[in-house]
Amino acid sequence: MSTNSTSYSDSNVTSNSNYTYRVIPFNPFGKACSYTNEVTSSTSLLIEPPASLIVSSISSRQIDLSWTYADYSNHSTAIERKRGKDGSWQIIDILDTGFSSYSDQGLSSDTEYFYRVKAVINEDVFSRPYPRDYLENENGVYTNLLTPRNLKASWQSSGIVKLEWAGNLSFESDLVIERKAENSNFVPIETIEPHDMKWYDIGVENDRNYTYRVKSVNSYNSSDYSNEAAIEALTLPEPENFKVVVSSDSEVIIEWDYEDETEISGFKVEMRVESDGRWNEIVSLGDSVRSYTAKHLDPDTVYYFRLISYESTMNLKSYTQPIEVLINTVKPPSDLVVTQIPNNQYLLEWKDNSDNEEGFIIERRHGSKDFVEIGRVTENTQSFIDSGLEFNSIYYYKVRAYNSNVQSTHSNTVSVRTLLQKTFSDLNTVPWARTAINSLLGMDIISGRSEDIFAPDDRITRAEFISLVVNAFELNKTPIGTFSDVRPEHWYYRNVMIAKNMGIVSGVGNNYFYPNEPIKREDMAVILARTLRITGSPLPHRDNSILDKFSDRHLISDYALSSLAVTHGAGIINGKGNNILSPDDFATRAEAAVMLYNVLFKL
């Protein structure tokens, strides 16, 4: 045989015969020193090769094979491979009976490989190969190109996404870049040379989410896709609570809130006059500013304002919705006051100074928090009740008027400290007085015998009752003079002398007051009626006949008759049942609390 031959076909054999072969090389100088190994085969053992072979490229390093035999018989199978059309066939593996697939791994990328399979007849004896020699160069398969890896996507600036990747990519290949927006499908957007390992996607929309992937390609091959790199929408939060308040016939106050943790360069305020006119920037403000006053505006003119938050490094902007403003002012309310009413509720009252409001906005602040809107009332309303507040806390209130176009500036700000949440353990015997006692306790007007004991059925002394009245009405006057039995060293001296100096009490004669004696119900009525009159809130006149319904009317002292009539008519003092008023009974601590509570909360 000729030089470099590596195969031979023996066609001079007979059936059912055994043959043994060996090979020795030679040249003009003689034969080699030894033969190859000997191989014995029999023509009676003829086996058909596999009838099919499927070869598939799996990756840049792997090709998979699968085959079948025509008669579904099982044989050991030898797998041969050559690299390129001009390569040499080599057996790369022999599989046991029962196997019909194989994964060839550790290959070179972007390389063409050819495969054929043979049935194993005996040691070093095989069937003819499949495919046959004349087809052996028709089933070449390339391994994939190397896959780009570590793909990353990041915002470079507004409208520009930067892609970066790694990998030893072929200089003879191109890189296909694919993108999908939100939940759409991937589409190719660019084919480039991969040498720079980066690329910029220009003109993307900032408010959409994007996902990218890349792969290498050439005229006959491609790689697997890289990992997917996702990037979230690039947006700035819109300013919140954007509002424009007309403060005069030529000025508006523009206010807004913004997330402090968001890094921005600042804000820009824009204005236009016509609804379809051009927006004009009127001011650029720092990132910590939350209000601006626009001046020199024309009355009876419609203006449009909008606010822009911006970040200059990334060239990002976020716009509020425009607000239409007519410079037609609403006068703010004034003289806001807050008053405690029963059940830990608080009555706000104010003066309405405008004639074109649609209503009023009530705002409240608790502690160090910001003012927040807690309610609205309709036009001409001048009061609001707030409830559900925490005990022993300070609240601040302010009110502003509004209509469809503008809001007024705020009224004066008022504050109130809510009740202390206290009670006593001995009030079960006086359920009719519990609310009054707890309310006055929470206001620090009344106190108990101890922390838990109020002693509601104990008689109240004249000094104790006068002290309650002075505290409840917040009377304040420099105490001057004395009673014979009320001296500066006594705990009640200041309160009794304030009441005396204001004309609320005058004693019982001979410059005595009897501070430690119990007080009668009719005397409490006299003191309350005088206090209301002297402090500027006199009770409406009532005819003494209002008391005729009580069977013990004759027990009322002459000096107390008119006071009992007006206090009973106002609901301050009531009977004790069975048409009994008991004017000369000594009052209990519970009865005193109820009378004082009625004065403070029912008038």
Image: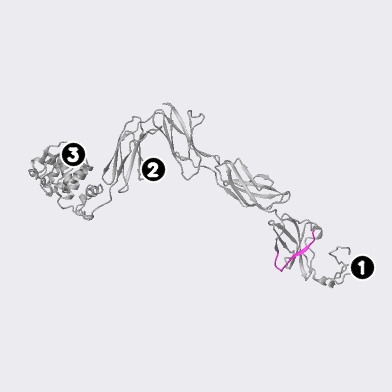
Q: Is 96 part of what is drawn in magenta? A: yes
**Residues rendered magenta in the picture:** 87-100
Among numbered discs 1 and 2, the one appearing first in the sequence: 1
Q: Looking at the figure, which quarter contains the N terminus?
A: bottom right
Measured Cα–Cα span from mark 1 to mark 2: 109 Å
Quick check: 594 left or right of 292? left
Residue 59 vertical position relative to residue 522 in the rendered view, above or below: below
**Residue 36 magenta:** no
**Picture disc at residue 29:** 1
Furthest residue in direction right, as rendered: 28
Q: Residues under labels 3 and 2: Cα distance?
A: 38 Å
177 or 463, nearer to the observer = 463
Compared with 279, 557 (above or below) is below
Residue annotated with mark 3 = 532
10 Å crowding of disc 1: few (<14), some (14-19), many (20+): few
**Along the viewing direction, whichever of 310 and 238 lies nearer the viewer:** 310
Type of amino acid under label 3 = Leu
Q: Which mark is residue 370?
A: 2
Q: Position of residue 374 (x, y in %)?
A: 36, 42
The one nearer the camera, 200 or 117, is: 200
Q: Amino acid at mark 1?
A: Phe
Question: Mark 1 touching mark 2, by CB under 8 A?
Answer: no
Name the residue located 56 percent from the left edge and 43 percent from the top edge.
208
**SS class, disc 3:** helix
